[in-house]
Image (spheres, rainbow, N blue to C red):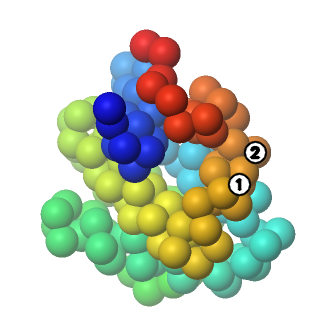
Amino acid sequence: MATVHEQRQRRIEHALLRDPGAVVDVSIRLWERLATELNQIIGERGVESMYARSLHQSQKQFSWLTPHPPQALEAAMTALRASLQGQADTVACAASTAMLMHFINTLNLLIGELLTNSILLKAWGDDVVNNAGTEPNE
């Protein structure tokens, strides 16, 4: 049986690849929805810092991601969009998934799995988040 981490990663990948050609738009939408939920808890600066950290961690594997210091989410999303648009869907999906997983793993360390799942569920719905920790229906 897959771990919760592996299940979450598969669900994110599935959401990103569901609509061929829309990986970039879906990725940006996932980030924006997550930021909207987290802004209420950790503030815009907290989200910006955590995003910059996940970008930095992901650059180790995806060196083509455009580096930048913490900045307003709108500017960060513009830079992410530009980086992802130059890649094949599967590569953009892998980079987006890695960034989101780094972000979620950090969030887990800071606030715990239960609260993280609650935030993800509110931001993305059960379509992406499997709150029960069971295998996703595919």
Could you tell me residue 138's position as x and y percent? 43, 13
Q: Identify the residue at horizontal 30%, vertical 73% (top origin).
A: 57
- Looking at numbered disc 1 in the image, what kind of residue is underneath it? Ile
Q: Is residue 53 left or right of residue 26?
A: left
Residue density around tag 2, few if under 14, some if 14–19, many if 20 or more, within 10 Å = some
Q: Which mark is residue 88?
A: none
Q: Is residue 5 left or right of residue 33?
A: left
Residue density around tag 1, few if under 14, some if 14–19, many if 20 or more, within 10 Å = some
Residue contact between numbered discs 2 and 1, judged by CB atoms under 8 Å: yes
Q: Which mark is residue 119?
A: 1
Q: Seen from this angle, which residue lies furthest right?
A: 40
Q: Identify the residue at horizontal 67%, vertical 83% (top origin).
A: 45
Nearest the viewer among 79 and 118 is: 118
Q: Identify the residue at horizontal 75%, vertical 78% (top origin).
A: 43
Total marks in image: 2
- On the question of residue 32 being in view, the answer is no
Could you tell me residue 8's position as x and y percent? 45, 42
Under tag 1, what secondary structure?
helix
Could you tell me residue 14's position as x and y percent? 41, 27
Q: Seen from this angle, which residue lies furthest front?
A: 1
| Residue that mark 2 sits on | 122
Under tag 2, what secondary structure?
helix
- On the question of residue 109 being in view, the answer is yes
Q: Residue 121, relative to residue 117: is it above or below?
A: above
Nearest the viewer among 93 and 109 is: 109
Could you tell me residue 40's position as x and y percent? 82, 69
